[in-house]
Image (spheres, rainbow, N blue to C red):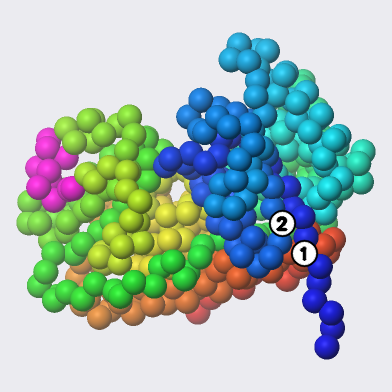
């Protein structure tokens, strides 16, 4: 029997606070991966800036994982410089303790990690987590001179993680070396989403759910228009909106103006997402922009068919006729047609689509699948030697 591999020490780098209540996709993914690595006996440390909307302790353990927060003065311009200097000093003092460094947002700290990893002979994996980095961060086309220097450093990462096909294509357009780009999606812990599915008669209203921030890019305005167009005031579909954000008042007003206020329930931020998903028949993701949505993964892991816009990540997993429906982002008419098709299916048909959704997401982005590939990278495997996750069949 081959000897068991020694535990790895992994440094997770995040350019935002941790933990943050209701945090975004990068924070959620880091937590999912770090907790699973720790469960498997690996040793993980998280380093982040100290920010206002997160805990302030310089060093503490969160769910048993050490978190180091680097302080900086809250002075515009100076804060970034001080943070960078403290991060460099941290890597110089402690960076060699770790077998691998994993940066979860391709921005300034990831670029510094790439430069320091080369200097300290430590492998660096950089995740491009979404379109923010590509359109507004250091990878943006109109980035200034300093950002272009950061982009050059990012190209030197040992591996660049692309969480969707579109992001991989964008990295190629940005001249990232193809041999070091690894297709590796966000992960979902399917064990968390094993609640008994909701059973309902075909005559009952379709129970749909949206989970996310109430911001323009999530496409809720288009969704409300589509619900009104598809069902009017017939109440064939009931929508639960889980999350909060600056557009809540405007969305409530829109629902009232469209005559669908009684069909839309705003639940605010919730911690019991797994139970809420188990009580739904259909997941909705009408976003105009994503990298690879955690909500999509969680809906599919819960056995829900999903109606999603044809954007990065969603198009990799959602296959019309197999596990859900796709429509062009922003097209309320096309979304309404998808909703009518879903509502017309017997509940048994929806459950069959949902079962396939769970099987597909488990094969493509299940936590065990993703973590095994990460461990291979942390141990030095070339990107091309780490087998790609199975593609969702279009047959």
Q: Is residue 314 visible?
A: yes
Q: Give the mark nearer the N terminus: 2 vs 1.
A: 1
Q: In the rendering, at what x and y percent does residue 20 appear?
A: 48, 39
Relative to 247, is 206 on the left or the right? left
Mark 1 surroundings: few (<14), some (14-19) or many (≥20) residues within 10 A: few
- Image quadrant where residue 69 sits: top right
Q: In the rendering, at what x and y percent does residue 301 appear?
A: 43, 68
Q: In the rendering, at what x and y percent does residue 165 appear?
A: 62, 56
Compared to residue 279, the image places residue 160 above or below, namely above
Relative to 54, is 107 on the left or the right? right
- Image quadrant where residue 387 sits: bottom right
Q: Main secondary structure of the magenta part?
A: helix
Relative to 180, is 138 on the left or the right? left
Compared to residue 280, the image places residue 203 above or below, namely below
Compared to residue 130, the image places residue 369 above or below, namely below
* Residue that extends furthest to the left in the rendered view of this protein: 234
> Which disc, if any, is residue 7?
1
Q: Is residue 172 visible?
A: no
* Residue occupying image coordinates x 47% and y 71%: 191
Relative to 13, is 197 on the left or the right? left
Compared to residue 323, the image places residue 94 above or below, namely above
Which region shows up in magenta? Answer: 255-265
Q: Nearer the viewer, residue 389 or 258?
A: 389
Q: In the rendering, at what x and y percent does residue 47 appear?
A: 68, 39
Q: Which residue is mark 2?
A: 43
Asked whether the beta carbons under mark 2 and mark 1 sit within 8 Å of each other, the answer is yes
């Amino acid at each position: 029997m081959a000897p068991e591999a020694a535990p790895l020490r992994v440094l997770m780098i995040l350019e935002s606070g941790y933990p943050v209540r209701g945090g975004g996709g990068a924070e959620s993914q880091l937590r999912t991966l770090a907790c699973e690595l720790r469960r498997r006996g690996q040793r993980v440390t998280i380093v982040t800036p100290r920010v206002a909307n997160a805990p302030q302790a310089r060093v503490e353990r969160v769910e048993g994982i050490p978190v180091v927060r680097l302080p900086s003065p809250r002075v515009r311009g100076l804060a970034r410089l001080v943070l960078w200097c403290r991060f460099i000093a941290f890597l110089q003092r402690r960076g060699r303790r770790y077998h691998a460094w994993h940066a979860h947002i391709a921005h300034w700290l990831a670029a510094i990690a790439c430069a320091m990893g080369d200097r300290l002979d430590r492998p660096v994996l950089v995740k491009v987590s979404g379109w923010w980095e590509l359109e507004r961060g250091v990878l943006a086309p109109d980035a200034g001179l300093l950002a272009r220097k950061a982009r050059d450093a990012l190209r030197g990462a040992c591996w660049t993680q692309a969480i969707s096909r579109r992001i991989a294509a964008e990295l190629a357009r940005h001249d990232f070396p193809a041999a070091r780009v690894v297709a590796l999606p966000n992960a979902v812990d399917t064990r968390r989403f094993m609640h008994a599915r909701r059973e309902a008669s075909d005559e009952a209203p379709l129970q749909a759910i949206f989970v996310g921030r109430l911001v323009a890019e999530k496409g809720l305005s288009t969704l409300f228009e589509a619900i009104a167009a598809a069902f009017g005031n017939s109440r064939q579909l009931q929508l639960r909106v889980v999350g909060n954000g600056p557009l809540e008042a405007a969305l409530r007003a829109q629902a009232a103006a469209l005559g669908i206020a009684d069909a839309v329930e705003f639940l605010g931020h919730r911690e019991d997402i797994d139970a809420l998903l188990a009580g739904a028949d259909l997941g909705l993701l009408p976003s105009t922009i994503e990298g690879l949505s955690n909500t999509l993964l969680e809906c599919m892991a819960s056995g829900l068919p999903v109606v999603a816009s044809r954007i990065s990540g969603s198009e990799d997993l959602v296959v019309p006729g197999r596990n859900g429906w796709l429509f062009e982002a922003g097209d309320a008419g096309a979304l309404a047609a998808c909703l009518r098709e879903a509502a017309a299916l017997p509940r048994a048909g929806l459950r069959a689509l949902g079962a396939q959704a769970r099987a597909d997401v488990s094969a493509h982005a299940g936590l065990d699948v993703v973590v095994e590939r990460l461990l291979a990278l942390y141990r030095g495997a070339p990107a091309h030697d780490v087998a790609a996750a199975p593609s969702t069949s279009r047959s």
